[in-house]
Amino acid sequence: MSQQRTFLEEIADALIAEGGEDLGKVKLIFPNRRAGLFLRRALARKIKNPVWAPEIYSLEDFLFQYTDVQIADKLTLVYEMYSAYRKVNPEAESLEKFFFWGEVLVGDFEDIDQYLVEPDHLFQSIQTQKELDDAFAYLGDEERLVIQSFWKSFMPQAKGDQLHFLKTWRLLVPIYQDYRMRLTDRKLAYKGMVYRSIAEACNADTFDPVQGDSQFWFAGFNALTSAEEAVLKYFVRETNARIFWDMDDYYVRSGQQESGQFFRQYKEDTLLGKTFPAEIPANFEKPKDIDAVGVSLEIGQAKYVGERLEELAKDPSWVPEETVVVMPMEHFLFPVLNSLPEGVKQVNITMGYPLKDTPLFGLLDAVLDLRKNTRTKRDGDKAFEAYSYRDVLAILRHPYVFSTVTKEASSLIYTIEKDNIISLDKADFANAGSFIKTLFYSEASPLDHLLALLNLLYDSLQENQPEQADLEVEYIIKFHEQLMRLKTLLVGNEAPDVTLFQKLFRKVAQAVRIPFSGEPLKGLQVMGVLETRNLDFRQVFVLGMNEGYWPAEAATQSFVPYNLRKGFGLPTFDQQDAFYSYLFYRLLQRAEKVTFLHNTSNETNLKGEQSRLLYQLRYETVHGEHIKYKSLSSDVAISVPQPILIRKTNEVLARLGEFLVTDDESSAHQRLSPSALNTYLDCRLRFYFRHVARLYEPEEVQAEIDPAVFGNILHHALEFLYADFIEKKGSSEIEKSDFDGIRKGVPEALQKAFEMHYSLGTGKQFKAEGRNLIAQSIARKLTMEILKNDESYAPFEILGLELDELPLDFQLTGERKVKLKGIIDRVDCKEGLVRVMDYKSGADNKVFYGIDTLFDREHPKRNKAAMQTFYYGMLYLNRNAVAEDIKVLAGLYNSRELFNDNFQVELELKAEGSRGRGTLVQDIRPFMPEFADGLKTLLDEIFDEETPFDQTDDLKKCKNCPYNSICHRD
């Protein structure tokens, strides 16, 4: 297959043919700068002797040489727009609320000027049919009907949202006029403003391009705005300028092909039509090798391209510069770069890397989140600013912070998570180092805060990683430049609050891109869709050929409704579709080998529908029957999770041995609790993970109360309540008359319990917010109900609260003893009855069906709470000599039944299948021998070398297990 000339090579040949050795008279204008760069390379390859080179411009550079204004950046335009808006609207909202639709107006005014629309006509308010007929009489029938269909909906009288629309609509002309005046006074402009000025001068024949003996050539244009069209027509008419249209006969001749829509219009134009060649190039329908590859997920597309490039790189004849990888969305860039093979030595990337995707943006934005979410709290008469633990941890864990002050950050993270600190203030960082202080202790404005942080980061990188931190330093410099520019812009304006400043900061970071360094004319070319304009490549890879990516989704944000945009000739998504369709066919027209990749997955946020452009290629072109279709997928073998079984090796037995009584005091603290035994009965493997392998769950801050934490808070509140009262009274005897005083202490006891959970230091008070307010209310209600029951039971004596000094060395079969422990919530006594009480805030009940069922893991109604309560009774009896005539009752204050009229604390023994009430257990001692036997059997099994740790068969028990992901049961 003979190699076709590229579009730029055709222009280079035309220049050489007409200009000979003096090309300096030609001023060649392209839509963008990149095409000019590639043209210079094409000329250099064809010209062997020194010659005067042509002057090459982008259209923007070419037109701006005829004006003395500077192009304003987007932020400046929005600020000037807001100033104009405030002038015409005394009731103007804040800049923060205006900012979004200020950006929309900037875009609308750009379009209005680019398409030479008279704002007085566009923004007029129509109220009667006569006004409607007269206002648009100058337009053609089609345009007039489209506009009239919009305004008729406002007749005979506007209502609802239409009134709000009209109120804003009437302000737009004075805003437009004042906006332009402000920019003119500052010698600033937006692109459309300059283009309109020159186009109007061209139409009025007052424009002077200072031609001399220059020849003007325009090349590669399509989808011209009205202003651009007026400029081109002027140069054709007045200077006999040449136009080189980058087109193909296939889509120009077909009236159904939207990609040729604009060329057909220009060809019919009396002036531009003369610039068309007698024979339009026909390259598109020449033979091509086209593959359409469906790949699941976008990363798969990048990997496929990497594999194909690896094959190409092994071919000595492969020319990387003649291969392009095109991606319609910038998020494909890094997967592609990470997939490039080592054989691809040079890469030219035309897509810049957005600042918003850098790690540094994440840190700076996190600091702004910290400031934005800061709340003023009061502790008595003292007010202080409180930070959320989430914001603090996000900053401390950021790679830049953690790597810079690793020891200090680690210590703070550990303290916050271990002590469950949900709220911090500046005082918590008063003794920190300079870096941490800059993060959390700054009194500066948000902008100056970020600048100070950037300076500190820069100094730190220069000091610690001077040679390895080039990229990070580049990030810092770019952000510093943009923030200083923003600071200059804000001079003379009201300082924005942190919310607005964060929006401005994000806009800047989104708009600015860090260019990739490299030689643009060497190596594999990696481009966005727009960058391919006017460039031709022999081998083309296109990723993301899915609907919504190419062509892109229609997303026109505008104040001008669709009908009015269409009627006045402003661009709509129809033109956008036509232009992107043109770029698609244009990319193919001189290519020899094309590979399209599209995603086949319809998962969330992924485009799974193949692009309609591929369907067009298949069904409407000569290439359709020759396209090779592939669908790549990995063979997914659904593996059945294998049972996990841990045998008791010497290492496992050594770990278990730490719970046995030995002479070694180093393991004296290792004791089994009743909750550990219940865990074993639920699932042996879970017991192994938690208590033998000690795979502890990571410490996490709990900002909201979960059921387990709620139970702990209730326990502590009741402990504080009775302990404080006993201390004040000087006696552990509780009388009925004491309860008025005890109830008064409930708020303080709950406050202490919550502050203990959240590790609030001296001088800080807990203030319930959100769901914690509900938790606090429920805890108070339960506490008051327990006191109500205690009052009816009084008088009684409290023998102990939260008793944890009750270790027990329990005899196993043989000579071994296992170390047990437990914490009893409360022990009280009255008239020959000792009550060992346990508080339960969950759904526990008191019914059990025999001691043996408490140790039967297969029993459907095994009562964990009853087993635990008997266990506590056993511990108490082991440590305390109780007279034979004294009954020992193990009871539950369970919230599930607490509010019943006939509430009892006693456990209830029922026969299997019985429907009536069971027997209340008034004394646990008769049950103790059987309980001890059951416990011994259980413990013998735990320490039996032949019994492995295996999984439960009851999957319901896996639902809330922290280790269910290990077993693949999550």
Image (cartoon, grey):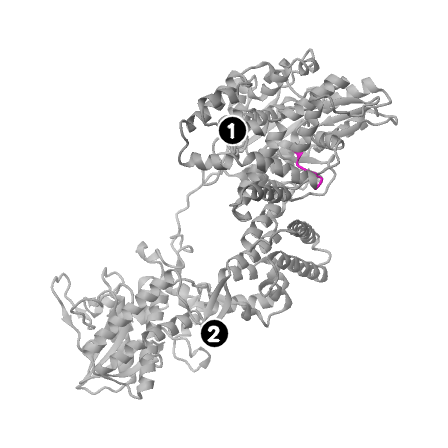
Which residue carries the number 1 mark?
611
Q: Amino acid at mark 2?
A: Gly
Q: Is residue 945 left or right of residue 149?
A: left
Q: Amino acid at mark 1?
A: Ser
Which residue carries the number 2 mark?
761
Q: Is residue 959 above or below residue 677?
A: above
| Residue name at image x 72 percent, y 62 percent | 463
Q: Using a 10 Å C-alpha cutoff, classify the residue at mark 2 as few (fewer than 14 neighbours), some (14 to 19) or many (20 or more).
A: few
User: Is disc 1 placed on a helix, strand or loop?
Assistant: loop
Q: CA distance from mark 1 to mark 2?
A: 61 Å
Report the span colored magenta.
186-191
Place of residue 792 in the rendered image (x, y in percent of width and height, measured from the top left): 19, 77
Q: Quadrant of residue 453?
A: bottom right
- Of pointers 1 and 2, the one earlier in the residue sequence: 1
Magenta-colored stretch includes residue 352: no
Q: Quadrant of residue 204?
A: top right
User: Is disc 2 placed on a helix, strand or loop?
Assistant: loop
Q: Is residue 31 left or right of residue 598?
A: right
Q: Which mark is residue 809?
A: none
Place of residue 511 in the rendered image (x, y in percent of width and height, measured from the top left): 62, 43
